Image (cartoon, rainbow, N blue to C red):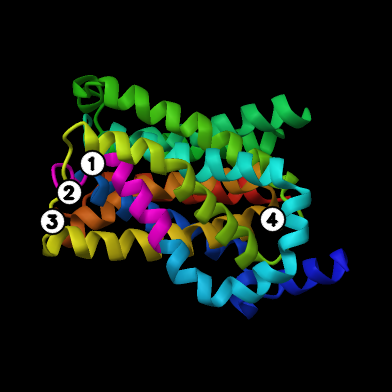
């Protein structure tokens, strides 16, 4: 029965769900937009409330499609309640709340830059939890991709790097990435079930765990501004970086493993710079081409068997 469920889960989504590199690249695209949006919406929605709306809204959207799978997989969820609770709490509640909180005090570009160190935390946790070391190829690919990220963020100049200033928001963002590294590494312990069941349980649990903190946040005087910008932001974060992003991330890691999937997060600052060019009118320059080339080269090296 378990094998049949895994086989059915593997083919959910057809051709797309058998393309791990495309899935992980799309996840990075959605997360880059989420980082920019998280900074943009500061002052409209407090961070814990935004995280709750993100996961609660995504759960409501997914539930009609996941209900029959949840009913079938409920015995498995109950049997592995400890693992499911840990994944929901770390990967949904804590990670995203810390990231949104960090964006209250730091810039979007700092957030994009800091996400490039996430593969190091994934590697750390896979070693701590399972004794798995990076291969020389994976380590080299991560270093090459990381160098490309720095070229893009620093506009090809070390002088720009020296002007970057880090604050408590950056520290909070790093803490979020440590939690993300644990979630990505620990995903190999997820019980066999349909992807919709796993995602619905994670989103619903993640939103549930945030309720006490959200009540405290709103009671302490933080308010939500309901305008066109915030409503559009809610719709975006519920669908793209949440529902689709995590569905694609989980499947990509399932197909190629956490360490080989981790370098794809280096695409987040790449996509972020593309958004700045496309949406903010910035010009494409030579350092963009050099940085993109290094990132894609590093991912190619790291993901080859």
Q: Residue at x 34, y 58 (%)?
A: 237
Q: Which residue is mark 2?
A: 224
Write the start and end of the magenta stretch as one range. 40-57
How many numbered marks, from 0 up? 4
Looking at the image, residue 230 sits to the left or right of residue 204; the answer is left
Tell which of 218 and 28 is nearer to you: 218
Q: Residue at x 21, y 31 (%)?
A: 220
Q: Quadrant of the N terminus?
A: bottom right
For mark 1, give the secondary structure. loop
Query: Residue 19 location, x and y as percent?
Result: 62, 68
Q: Which residue is mark 3?
A: 280
Query: Residue 203 location, x and y as percent?
Result: 51, 55
Q: Which-is-in-front pick, marks 3 and 4?
A: 4
Q: Which residue is mark 1?
A: 46
Res 194 seen here? yes
Whether label 3 touches label 4, CB < 8 Å: no
For mark 3, give the secondary structure. helix
Q: Which-is-in-front pick, marks 3 and 2?
A: 2
Q: Residue at x 65, y 67 (%)?
A: 70
Whether label 2 touches label 1, CB < 8 Å: yes
Q: Is 42 in the magenta? A: yes
For mark 4, give the secondary structure. helix
Q: Which residue is mark 4?
A: 254
Q: Quadrant of residue 132?
A: top right
| Disc 2 from disc 1: Cα separation | 7 Å
| Disc 3 from disc 1: Cα separation | 25 Å
Query: Closer to the N terminus: mark 4 or mark 2?
Result: 2
| Disc 4 from disc 2: Cα separation | 37 Å
Please name the predominant secondary structure of the magenta segment in the image: helix
Q: Residue at x 77, y 31 (%)?
A: 130
């Amino acid at each position: 029965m378990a094998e049949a469920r895994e086989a059915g889960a593997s083919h959910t989504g057809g051709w797309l769900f058998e393309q791990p590199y495309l899935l992980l690249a799309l996840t990075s695209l959605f997360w880059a937009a989420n980082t920019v949006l998280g900074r943009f919406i500061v002052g409209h929605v407090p961070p814990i409330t935004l995280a709750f709306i993100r996961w609660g809204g995504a759960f409501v959207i997914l539930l009609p499609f996941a209900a029959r799978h949840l009913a079938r997989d409920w015995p498995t969820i109950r049997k592995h309640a400890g693992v499911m609770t840990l994944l929901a709490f770390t990967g949904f509640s804590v990670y995203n709340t810390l990231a949104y909180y960090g964006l209250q005090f730091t810039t979007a570009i700092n957030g994009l830059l800091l996400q490039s160190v996430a593969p190091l935390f994934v590697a750390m946790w896979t070693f701590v939890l399972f004794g798995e070391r990076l291969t020389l190829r994976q380590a080299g690919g991560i270093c090459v991709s990381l160098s490309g990220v720095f070229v893009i963020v620093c506009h090809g100049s070390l002088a720009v790097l020296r002007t970057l200033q880090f604050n408590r928001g950056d520290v909070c963002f790093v803490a979020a990435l440590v939690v993300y590294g644990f979630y990505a590494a620990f995903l190999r312990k997820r019980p066999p079930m349909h992807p919709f069941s796993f995602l619905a349980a994670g989103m619903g649990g993640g939103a549930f765990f945030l309720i006490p903190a959200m009540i405290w946040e709103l009671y302490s005087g933080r308010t939500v501004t309901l305008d066109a910008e915030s409503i559009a932001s809610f719709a975006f974060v519920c669908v793209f970086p949440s529902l689709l992003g995590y569905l694609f991330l989980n499947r990509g890691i399932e197909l190629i493993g956490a360490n080989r999937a981790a370098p794809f997060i280096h695409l987040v600052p790449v996509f972020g710079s593309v958004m700045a060019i496309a949406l903010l009118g910035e010009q494409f320059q030579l350092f963009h081409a050099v940085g993109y080339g290094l990132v894609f080269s590093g991912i190619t090296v790291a993901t080859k068997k």
